[in-house]
Amino acid sequence: MRHDFIDKYAEINSPVHRLEPRIKILAALVAVALVTSEPKGELFAFLFYFAVLGAVVSQSRVPVVYVLKRLLIVSPFIIAAGLLLPLSYLMTGEDISGNISKFFLWPLSIVLKALAALLILTILTSTARVHELLAALRGFKMPAVFGVVSALMYRYIFILYDEMLRTNRARRSRTVGRGSSGTVAVYGNQAAMVFIRSFERSRAVYRAMLARGFEGEFPLRKQKKFTFTGAAITALFILCLGLIRIFL
């Protein structure tokens, strides 16, 4: 079993990947705060936001197609949130007739804010391993139990995915040439089998961890070193976004 769809491109050697994880987390939080603090209805500034973020993606060498796929997965929910904004005005009885800003510009700005924030987080998770980000959060005094639970979730999600592939392959091999009759029951049984087999397999994995000395906390791996070059690059990134936020 080897699945790496979460941090698939985290081992690329690029200037963004070489940055210390704590610096990247801080930069991502500041960038999200700057982008989402744009006034309602502001659209022009996002041309420059996406230009800066596009330059970061280019420097990270993460495939653009991969980044766009990540955005497309969540985009239906973002677009739905934007479309529901005018509906909320109608439900509250607010008159928005003739007000193009509330009916069109505000929902569009919400969509752009969400897409920009999602792009920032995609860059963050694509340029660092999950265990590196968790270790960096531990450096920010995140409670140890949160780090352990997150690390276990990250590991066990692959077990769930692997069992889904196994049961899906078994289902296809046993239903060759059959129609759509009983499809709901078949998929229901498959889902139940996935969870049962994943639970049993996760227990075996946990027992193996205990046998190897696991005491409730994962050992911290060697972290990337802080460099002034990385700090300068991060400061330049935040400065660009800050100038866009102030002057545009």
Image (cartoon, rainbow, N blue to C red):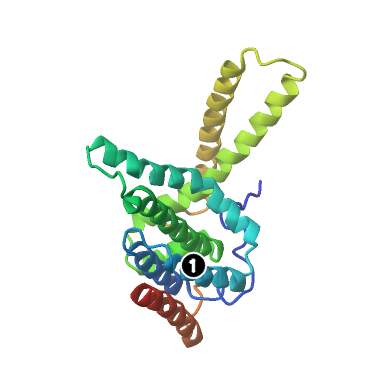
Q: Which of 235 and 55 is in front in this view?
A: 55
Residue 31 position, x and y percent, is 40, 68
Q: Of all residues shown, which one is farthest toward the right?
A: 177
Task: State whether residue 208 appears in this view.
Answer: no
Task: State whether residue 229 appears in this view.
Answer: yes
Residue 213 position, x and y percent, is 48, 54
Q: Nearer the viewer, residue 128 or 206?
A: 128
Q: Which residue is drawn at 52% across and 30% down?
A: 195
Above or below, comparing residue 55 to residue 195 in the picture: below
Kind of element beneath mark 1: helix
Q: Which residue is drawn at 54% across and 46% down?
A: 73
Residue 109 position, x and y percent, is 39, 56
Q: Is 179 situated left or right of 235 in this image? A: right
Tag 1: amino acid? Leu
Residue 242 position, x and y percent, is 38, 76
Q: Of all residues shown, which one is farthest toward the front?
A: 98
Q: Residue at x 57, y 16 (%)?
A: 185
Quarter of the figure with residue 184: top right
**Position of the C terminus by quadrant:** bottom left
Q: Of all residues shown, which one is farthest toward the top?
A: 181
- Label 1 CA crowd tier, 10 Å (few <14, some 14–19, many 20+): few
Residue at numbered disc 1 = 47
